[in-house]
Image (cartoon, rainbow, N blue to C red):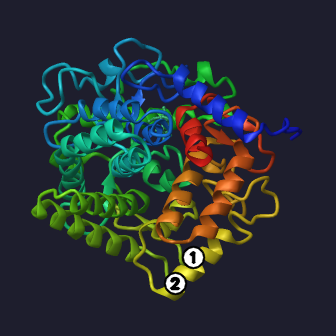
Amino acid sequence: REYRPPARLTSQLLAARAAYVLRGNDQGVMTSAAPRLYPHMWSWDAAFVAVGLARLSVPRAITEIDTLLGAQWGDGMIPHIVFSPDATGYFPGPDRWGCHLGDVALAPPFPATSGICQPPVHAIALQRIVEAARRQGRSDRQAAGDFLERAWRPLVAWHRWLAEARDPHGHGRVAVLHGWESGMDNSPRWDGPYSRVEVGPDLPPYTRKDTAVVTDATMRPSDREYDRYLWLIEEMRRVRYDAAAMYETVSFAVEDVLVSALLAVACDVLADLGEERQQPAADVADLRGWARRFRAGVAGSVDPVTGLARDRDLRTGEWLSTPTIAGFAPLLCGGLSRADEAALLAQFEGDAWCGHPDLVAAVPPSTSPAAADFRAREYWRGPQWPVIAWLFHWSFARRGWAERAAVLREEGLRLVGAGDFAEYYDPTTGEPLGSMQQSWTAAAVLDWLC
Ligand code: 9WN
């Protein structure tokens, strides 16, 4: 396929454009994930957006997370979408979820939300806000300190909910009950579990809106996939989003290694902040315990043959070994022996992944270009997502791998250098795909450049 990348912008211009994108998507107290395709707030997007906003304005970054936490459910779950009252252009919207209609006891009546969650990266945002405030004046430092006090209990409650409601048997791995909960909707990781989801004959009819925005339908999940996505919502609605009933009955239930690794890291990040800022010792001890448990659960999932971490289908008990970016989850949270970690790092940088000879930029593709499942333009089936590059960059820096972190930053900037701020990119041509002006892409760039 012919695609000639336009010239790279200077760093200054790229950063200015990134700020402009976030400004354009700002609805006041929430930032839409993208202007047309996603005109609401998404949970993990909001955390990454706050990381970027912290470089522009600490108070505005705080507002973003305050808005998200304002939609937290009574049991601690942070919902994956907080619907903007001012936007309608997304399906499934509030009425299809039905969480705000009164019979879902734990959901807030306002704002309307979805009934599932997304990866727990919010403590990372808190840490980056505190960090950014350190470099600013007294009022920002004070605002960040107050924010930490205010966000502490909600964030501990969120982590507790994930540990208890989504890992009730203590496996050390968080269960996702919908591909959307993983944030990697149609990753080939989920093909097996989804193939076992039988769509009932009583699935209410619906019309997709996403393919009216991204008109090349091959860049989005298929209609067949959407039927299953909608069917799972139907199953959840029928048990009124009761967490225990969902865990037992929803036809898609998979222990997700990437979410589990992120929970482990997020617990440690939050515990570090809590120790530094004198938060309750009992909370800190719980956080450390969850960090240990989920780190061990991720390490315990590693395939002895490939060295990659694996998800596990809770409905069949089988390990899922499709080679996707989630296989590198242990690099985020640690927990492997030195030798296993070195081998996994070598694989990450090797020619089946970031070092594949066909890649324009050496950042991880969502699926290995060497795998039979690889599709260069199809959403989570192959494209590179700048936000995922940022996540590995941040984790590598946190783990003390400064040089490797610098390479991911440099290569990530190569990918996004023309300033489209696309949702994802074709790894083999560098073509921007999906939605443009995607907020979390702009946020990653701001963090890299400012
Ligand atoms: C469903 C907002 C979200 C991201 C997800 C990404 C995509 C939604 C969709 O967009 O998912 O939640 O409609 O495709 O897969 O990671 O949070 O940017």
Task: Report x, y in % for residue 228.
Answer: 43, 37
Q: Disc 2 marks which amino acid? A: Asp
Q: Residue furthest front?
A: 138
Location of residue 115 by image quarter: top left
Residue 340: mark in rendering: 2
- The answer to which of 355 and 93 lies nearer the viewer is 355
Quadrant location, the N terminus: top right
Height in image: 19 above or below 405?
A: above
Query: Mark 2: which secondary structure?
Result: helix
Residue 177: mark in rendering: none
Q: How many marks?
A: 2
Height in image: 340 above or below 283?
A: below
Q: Does the closest atom of ligand 1 sit within 8 Å of the Cβ of label 2?
A: no
Q: Residue drawn at (23%, 26%), measured in percent from left and top?
A: 99
Q: Disc 1 marks which amino acid? A: Leu
- The answer to which of 406 and 303 lies nearer the viewer is 406
- Mark 2 crowdedness (10 Å alpha carbons): few <14, some 14-19, many ≥20: some
Q: Which residue is mark 1?
A: 344
Height in image: 405 above or below 94?
A: below
Query: Mark 1: which secondary structure?
Result: helix
Q: Does the closest atom of ligand 1 sit within 8 Å of the Cβ of label 1?
A: no
Height in image: 320 above or below 191?
A: below
Task: Report x, y in % for residue 355.
Answer: 74, 66
Location of residue 146 by image quarter: top left
Quadrant location, the C terminus: top right
- From the viewer's perspective, is 243 left or right of 448? left
- Mark 1 crowdedness (10 Å alpha carbons): few <14, some 14-19, many ≥20: many
Residues tagged 2 and 1 counted as in contact (Cβ below 8 A): yes
Task: Estimate the spatial distance between the alpha carbons at disc 2 and disc 1, rounded to whole Å.
Answer: 6 Å
Q: Residue drawn at (20%, 48%), measured in percent from left and top?
A: 152
